């Protein structure tokens, strides 16, 4: 039986180059039966701790066409039988799982997969699945075109606790996670298939993290939809549940994350460095001693995430490619990463002035579009942020087998607050905490500003409790010191420290810091 394997399947993540096959019978790959079978060539699901019963599986699957739902799977299990030919099906594969005899090591393999690939396709026969809905090899039992929506519920089973971000190749219309932060987490996505480029022999184009692609023109294309779930536990749990998606692209991945206030270091026993950040001794700074904990932000206002998108400059017929990038960012992520509460994130000032969404490469983009999502309708309380009309630029490589040949630079989308936050510090002594901010904020030179301190209730939630605020004199040099009593701030408390400026009758977001007391 001939197999043509997509970038999401085994040969791709083992570092081998996937083949490209055009015409009838092309765009085929191993199905779930193949991926569930033992293998001495790659790390398959039986090698996961707990075996097949522990792997993620599709609990529900349906296809929507013009508002009409066709149910395909209900109450699915990890060992569901092979469906009939023409049935819409999914293939779920482990990335970088150690095969028999391999020793887990970073960059080699892992005892538990660090990513999971999910490809939407259709069953051809046992062991074989197609994934191009524009030219299916067999007659589909359910119609699928560019306007169809796949409604997928994926039970993460034993791996839900390690879920971080997810990338989708397609256009998402709904996204939500239940049991977030637990092993038994379940995700649901509604996704439209999109025209997807194929690179000749891979060319480094479809990989995580994204890098320069060695081919400026797509060799072919197909209509499909795919997911990659990141289980990279080195990433902050603040991005658990974030969805990023691209269209007309090979791959997308989060390439850099820096917390809004940088890493924090703790200094048990107190101590002092003076200044408005807290003070020392018996003053309002809280004092020293065994019950005192001090947290000092190492950097100020460097909070940013960078996302990379790999795509061709042109299609095989020479038509210029314009891709798009979208992110479903929950209210919880906006609060925990940027320190912005849901009401602040909904403001025009935050979306247009405070949060900067821009390219850091030489390509171009359209104007970002913010669309409000709700848990009751789309599955998430948060925002769908879309950057349309991405174009890509070429460069020259000098370190590959095609040295000095043109390459396509990945689009780099940077999200960060435009204004660096002042340095933040917290000193806790008993039930009294002193929160300080000190630094330069140009907006406060001409406008009245204030610092608002809120306790973030959970890394997975969007609720914050305001515990204090301080109005500042007009000056670019911000210096604040707030005393919070009643034990509201203690060890492990996560705080949002927001600088706001007065505009007319309301306060608007300028910048913020997020600090965890350690």
Image: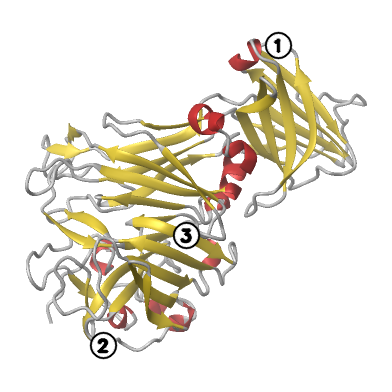
Q: Quadrant of residue 290?
A: top right
Distance between the alpha carbons at the discs numbered 3 and 2: 28 Å
Q: Quadrant of residue 399?
A: top left
Left or right of 169: which side holds 495?
Answer: right
Disc 2 crowd rating (10 Å Cα; few below 14, some 14-19, many 20+) is: some
Left or right of 106: which side holds 503?
Answer: right
Disc 1 crowd rating (10 Å Cα; few below 14, some 14-19, many 20+) is: some
Residue occupied by mark 1: 474
- The residue drawn where x is 33% and y is 52% is 208
In percent of width and height, residue 72 lies at 36, 80
In percent of width and height, residue 492 lies at 73, 48
Task: Reply above or below: 142 against 7.
Answer: below
In percent of width and height, residue 400 lies at 16, 42
* Lower position in the chain sequence, tag 3 or tag 2: 2
Question: As rendered, which of 273 and 214 lies closer to the eye?
Answer: 214
Question: As rendered, which of 377 and 410 lies closer to the eye?
Answer: 377
- The residue drawn where x is 28% and y is 64% is 8
Residue occupied by mark 3: 175
Task: Reply above or below: 221 against 53.
Answer: above
User: Does the CB distance between marks 1 and 2 fall below 8 Å?
Assistant: no
Distance between the alpha carbons at the discs numbered 1 and 2: 71 Å
């Amino acid at each position: 039986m001939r197999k043509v394997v997509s970038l999401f399947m085994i040969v791709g993540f083992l570092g081998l180059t996937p083949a490209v096959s055009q015409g009838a019978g092309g765009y085929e790959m191993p199905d779930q039966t193949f991926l569930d079978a033992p293998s001495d060539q790659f790390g398959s699901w039986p090698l996961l701790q707990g075996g097949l019963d522990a792997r993620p599986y599709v609990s529900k699957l349906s296809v929507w066409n013009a508002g009409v739902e066709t149910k395909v799977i209900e109450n699915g299990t990890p060992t569901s039988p092979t469906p009939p030919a023409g049935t819409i099906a999914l293939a779920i594969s482990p990335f970088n799982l150690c095969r028999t005899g391999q020793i887990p090591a970073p960059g080699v393999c892992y005892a538990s997969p660090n990513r999971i690939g999910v490809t939407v396709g259709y069953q051809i026969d046992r062991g074989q699945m197609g994934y191009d809905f524009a030219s299916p090899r067999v007659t589909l039992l359910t119609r699928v075109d560019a306007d169809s929506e796949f409604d997928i519920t994926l039970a993460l089973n034993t791996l839900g606790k390690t879920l971080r971000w997810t990338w989708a190749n397609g256009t998402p219309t709904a996204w939500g996670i239940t049991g977030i932060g637990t092993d038994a987490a379940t995700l649901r996505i509604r996704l439209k298939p999109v025209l997807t480029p194929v690179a000749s022999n891979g060319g480094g184009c479809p990989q995580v993290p994204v890098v320069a692609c060695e081919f400026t023109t797509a060799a072919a294309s197909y209509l499909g939809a795919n997911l990659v779930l990141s289980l990279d536990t080195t990433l902050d749990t603040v991005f658990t549940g974030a969805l990023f998606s691209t269209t007309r692209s090979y791959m997308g991945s989060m390439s850099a994350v820096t917390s809004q206030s940088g890493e924090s270091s703790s200094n048990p026993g107190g101590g002092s460095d003076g200044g408005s950040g807290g003070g020392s001794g018996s003053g309002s700074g809280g004092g020293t001693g065994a019950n005192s904990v001090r947290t000092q932000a190492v950097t100020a206002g460097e909070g940013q995430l960078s996302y990379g998108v790999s795509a061709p400059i042109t299609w095989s017929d020479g038509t210029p490619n314009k891709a798009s990038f979208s992110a479903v960012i929950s209210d919880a992520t906006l609060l925990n990463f940027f320190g912005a509460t849901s009401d602040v994130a909904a403001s025009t000032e935050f979306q247009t002035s405070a949060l900067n969404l821009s390219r850091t490469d030489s390509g171009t983009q359209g104007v970002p579009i913010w669309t409000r999502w709700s848990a009751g309708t789309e599955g998430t309380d948060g925002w769908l942020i879309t950057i349309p009309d991405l174009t890509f630029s070429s460069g020259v490589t000098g370190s590959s087998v095609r040295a000095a040949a043109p390459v396509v630079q990945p689009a780099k989308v940077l999200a960060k607050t435009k204004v660096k936050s002042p340095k933040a510090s917290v000193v806790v002594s008993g039930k009294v905490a002193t929160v300080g901010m000190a630094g330069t904020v140009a907006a406060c030179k001409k406008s009245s500003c204030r610092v608002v301190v809120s306790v973030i209730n959970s890394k997975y939630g969007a609720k914050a409790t305001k515990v204090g605020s301080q109005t500042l004199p007009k000056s670019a040099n911000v210096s604040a010191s707030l005393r919070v009593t009643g034990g509201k701030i203690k060890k492990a408390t996560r705080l949002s420290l927001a600088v706001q400026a007065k505009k007319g009758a309301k306060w608007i977001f300028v910048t913020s810091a997020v600090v965890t007391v350690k």
